Image (cartoon, grey):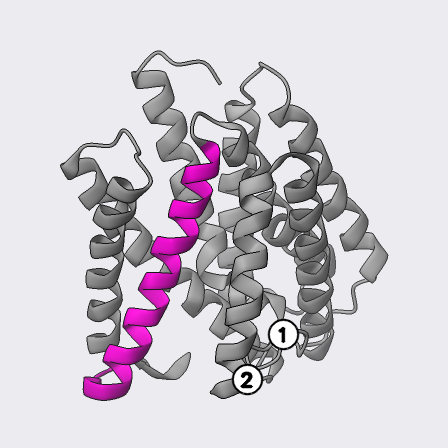
Amino acid sequence: MLIRFITALVGLPLLFAAVWIGEIWFSALVTLVAAVASIELTLMARRWGHYVSIPLVTVPVVALVAIAHVLSRTSVPPNAITFALAVLSVALLAWLVANRGRQMAFARPVTALAIILYAGGFLSHLPLLRALEQGREWVLFLLLVTFATDTSAYFVGKFIGRTPLAPSISPSKTIEGAVGGMIGAVGASLAANYVLGLNVSLWEALILGSLIGVVGQLGDLAESRIKRLADVKDSGALIPGHGGVLDRLDSIVLNLVVVYYFVSWETLQNGLSF
């Protein structure tokens, strides 16, 4: 627990600093994280019988984030392309989680594509979000509300959790913890909206917080399912006390898509430019 706390104490200020500085430094950090996440996923895929080449997935992942960085510096909103990418990413993540067709002839290529879109397709939205109106504040909002969801779910589940949420996927998660996570998400959404000075109404902050609370916990369960398929406790050991990069990303990647398209919709509604 102490190592986990120390790691967070050191890592979070660095993360927030990268978000605040933005530009190429932020995109470089996202690229590095996406590359490591793709490697962790590839190694887990090998454990369930799908040998996928690391360069085969890592190179496209890096390319997707790099393209997103370039697009973020243009005045052309790529929402049609990124939305199609997000939908395909969610579909292939569902395919991975469902564990269907493991013996099918094209199972390995589909797994490789799923890894590319999980690590690159989702995270490519981060440079795009950072480039939107009040993008810096929105990235911080995403991180703060997601962290609040995870923290609330953990402590509520630890102290009063009794009813299993999804015992076949993650035995430690409880319905009480999930409800606590939802409450934490809504509360953090309202607080972050005010503190960060975002132009969001009360009801929109409530809805967005609720969505983040639900979607983030679904992302957490999805990654837990993938780890169970690979028969591993953590996705890696890169972050002391926390496991791998994927163990920190599981709640963020799907919430990133929710926040990005919410902000894009808000931008269009208000007639603002990208």
Residue 225 is tagged as none
User: Where is 268 relative to 232, above or below?
Assistant: above
User: Where is 4 relative to 19, above or below?
Assistant: below
Task: Name the element at disc 1.
Answer: loop
Residue 46, image quadrant: bottom right
CA–CA distance between discs 1 and 2? 10 Å
Reply yes or no: does residue 147 show up in magenta: yes
Indicate the position of residue 169 as horizontal and vertical percent values.
42, 79
Tell me which residue sits at (48%, 37%) in the image: 136
Indicate the position of residue 247 as horizontal and vertical percent values.
54, 70
The stretch of residues the image draws in magenta is: 135-164
Q: What residue is shown with label 1? A: 239
Report whether residue 110 is seen.
no
Indicate the position of residue 186 as horizontal and vertical percent values.
21, 54
Q: Which callout, 1 or 2, points at the residue further toward the start of the chain?
A: 2
Q: Is residue 35 left or right of residue 89?
A: right
Q: Is residue 133 left or right of residue 269?
A: right
Q: What residue is shown with label 2? A: 3
Please tell me which residue lies in front, 54 or 179.
Answer: 179
Please tell me which residue lies in front, 123 or 2.
Answer: 2
Count of numbered circles on the image: 2
Please tell me which residue lies in front, 231 or 264.
Answer: 264
User: Where is 113 relative to 147, above or below?
Assistant: above
Query: Looking at the picture, which amino acid does disc 1 mark?
Result: Ile
Q: Residues within 10 Å of mark 1 (few under 14, many from 20)?
A: some
- Number of the front mark, 1 or 2: 2
Query: Looking at the picture, which amino acid does disc 2 mark?
Result: Ile
User: Where is 95 relative to 134, above or below?
Assistant: below
Magenta segment main secondary structure: helix
Indicate the position of residue 75 as horizontal and vertical percent values.
58, 14
Tell me which residue sits at (66%, 79%) in the image: 237
Reply yes or no: does residue 8 show up in magenta: no
